[in-house]
Image (cartoon, coloured by chain):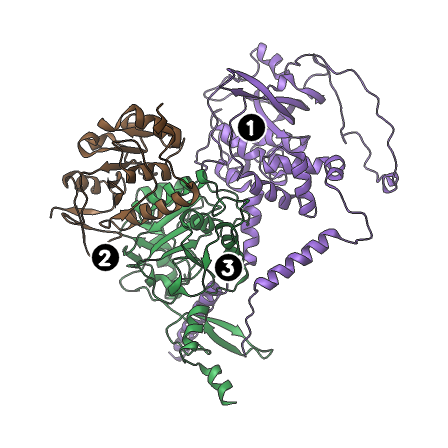
Chain colours: A brown, B purple, C green
Amino acid sequence: MTPDTLTGGFATPPTDSARAFRAILDALARPGTIRTVDGAEPPAPLSSAAGAVALTLLDGTTPVHLAGDHDTQDLRDWLTFHTGAPLVAAAEAAFAFGTWDALLPLDRFAIGTPEYPDRAATLVIEMPNLHPEGATLRGPGIKGSAYLSLPATAPFIANRSLFPLGFDAFLTCGNRIAGLPRSTIVRDA
Amino acid sequence: MYVAVKGGERAIDNAHAFLAEERRGDPAIAVLTVPQIREQLRLAVNRVMAEGSLYDPDLAALAIKQARGDLIEAVFLIRAYRTTLPRHGFSSPVETAQMHMTRRISATFKDAPGGQILGPTFDYTHRLLDFRLAADGDVPPAPTAPATQGPVPHITGFLNRDGLIETADRDDTPPPDLTREPIELPADRALRLQAITRGDEGFILSLAYSTQRGYGRTHAFVGELRIGMVEVEMDIPELGFAICIGEVELTECETVNQFKGSKTEPPQFTRGYGLTFGQTERKAIAMSLVDRALRWKELGEDFTGAPAQDEEFVLMHADNVQATGFLEHIKLPHYVDFQSELELIRKLRAEAAAASQKEAAE
Amino acid sequence: MTDQSYNFAYLDEQTKRMIRRAILKGIAVPGYQVPFASREMPMPYGWGTGGVQVTAACLTPEDRLKVIDQGADDTTNAVSIRKFFQRTAGVATTEATAEATLIQTRHRIPEHPLTEDQILVYQVPIPEPLRFLEPRETETRKMHSLEEYGLMHVKLYEDIARHGSIATSYAYPVKVEGRYVMDPSPIPKFDNPKLGDCPALQLFGAGREQRIYALPPHTQVVSLDFDDHPFQATKAPHDCDLCGASESYLDEVIVDDAGNRMFVCSDTDFCRSRREAGHAGRLTMQEAAE
């Protein structure tokens, strides 16, 4: 445990997490929009937006998977101290954090069951950049169509074909976040 | 001119003030204290603790006072208080064999190691109003006997030795917590027992009674009923061992049920189990009958359609805080829905009248 | 002023996290009922505990909250819930639909069109649209998973056979994005067309039944019907006697012992703002003439 473990959480958890949640909620409810979310300062390589997702949504009941370079001792310690979330393999994870390449292959993650489609993983994909351009998005939350710089389209098209099963995703970059629920219909730009 | 027939903030405030005044009653009469309720209405306190799922006699007594003696309202107050309490940890399973018993009876054996203790029971009182209680009066002290030393084994254990009763192996799987996870059906026995122990006493009593009258009959005998204090222990990881954090009074009932065997099980006695906070033996006995009735599937018995066998029916309707809330919510205004029903009925009646007129004309 | 003896918006942080996760899954699968571990609230089950928990999980200190019951801001339960959040979250409140950022409602959708910047939280008594056809949760859950909604269509069609039209006037079932049949809570079917393609986020909370579900903005919502019996949103065939509105949902009020009636907007904010803008109905004009 390093001194950094104890810092970087929300300064005022009830109101900071409330504001963070509204940004996260808005991002997922309106795919293609990019929100900023502040207040978390996690150890690298976790972005502050992904850190805010962790602080807002994780606790002892949410198994977490750290993929690839995100699986560091510093980050493990930080998550454990601030959220109490157990660290697990991809298949058991309710939440997973990592870069796109590290999260692949995506079929490792839970997609829910026909009776409980909510029991699916949420992927937090750390992006080098994030823009409202690129792949075309349609579906719930979108008036007409929207655009988002996705790391790839085929896996999201495949995920949509499983609906109402499937994983849900957030894309994070610095303090910015976008949501991509399984309901979104993705097409190449 | 239209005046709002709707209540406002002032109406609510005034209603609360009126309620407080009614709660106090005639100011010429001494005010009832919380310790008086705790000591002298102890069975009411026990019921509120059992159904409120919170062991705190003082708070339960306060809730009874605040609720003007309405026990379901008191249970609700305790539940609403309990739900915001932080969880610091979990206790180890209590050892009821170590109970300091004030009452212990068995209907299946005339005597057993540890003996029968009648304890503070209404059982053999004649239900004649005691007018001496209407006057103040001190009670002469009751005779005492030395407490039994050491653990007193459960009576079903003796049957178990001979293989006459189903085995109940120790299972250390952490039970689900229905106050922290939504109920998922089918439920396991731990979840069912949890739902029944905090379920409404009247509902559980009636279900148990229905099994005795043939709706899912289970032929129950009270193998053992014991009431007393048990220690609650908690593992402290920093210490590396468990320490006693307090004592709670519990009622435990184990029924022995006749069982002729099924496709999967040989003929043997089977068990029903009840465990409740405080001296609440009607509830504990009823609980063990309903528990046994709900076990039809694992014992390979037939589902006869009896309400007490129907897990979803029992679990979804046992909670009196849920039931009261939903029942009483029909007092809330529904005039928007009612208006749309009015329009619909008018339309359907007009159509029906037009149709019959047309028929008459033809 | 916030009551310091409670956490912001009453619920503890762990409870809020659990509810927030359920809301997000509800958004991801529009119309699907997500189970959540509803807590005992300081108001009774059936009185909006689901809506209150969803609101508590969504509120920020910057929000401006509006609470309505039957369309009105001044009904007792609306007043009680609004006071609860004033006390525990210290949020600003309003009666004006256009000024609110979060609206908790029981049984109505406001007349004033909602916007991108708003969340509408519904209080839901029975979230399961199939419940009155099949009382068992184990069965209805299976029916949703198999998309087996024939029973619902049979029920609606039996209505038509018997009455000539569908005899459901509120809590009228809808199909969301062509997948889940959903109960829109006991709103009058007059409000059903506002559910679809709504710019605001709509969240539904059922406390006693432990379910949360959602309609993201601009979600496709279709009221169930048949080609030869299309869905019709109906209201009393009158204008509001106070503001003269012809397109708002009306309450029928008995005004004297002779049983005379008046019809007034159920949405009190809508009616007041129309009157303030100079609109008048039958009774307002009568009064002005006297």
Residue B294 rendering spot, x and y as whole percentages? 52, 31
Q: Which of A114 and B86 is in front in this view?
A: B86
Whether residue C200 can be seen here: yes
In front: label 3 or label 1: 3
Identify which residue is drawn at 66% across, 30% down. Answer: B278
Position of the N terminus of chain A, as image quadrant, is: top left
Q: Which of C185 and B27 is in front in this view?
A: B27
Q: Mark 2 points at which residue?
A: A143
Residue A163 rendering spot, x and y as whole percentages? 25, 42
Mark pair 2, 3: CA separation: 32 Å
Residue C45 rendering spot, x and y as whole percentages? 52, 48
Q: In which quarter of the image is residue A125?
A: top left
The chain under label 1 reads: B
Left or right, C29 with respect to B307, comes to left
Secondary structure type for disc 3? helix
The chain under label 2 reads: A
Query: Vertical placement of A120 versus C217: above or below?
Result: above
Q: Name the residue under label 1.
A: B292
Secondary structure type for disc 2? loop
Which amino acid is tagged 2? Lys
User: Number of marks in the image?
Assistant: 3
Crowding near pointer 1: few (<14 within 10 Å), some, many (20+)?
Answer: many
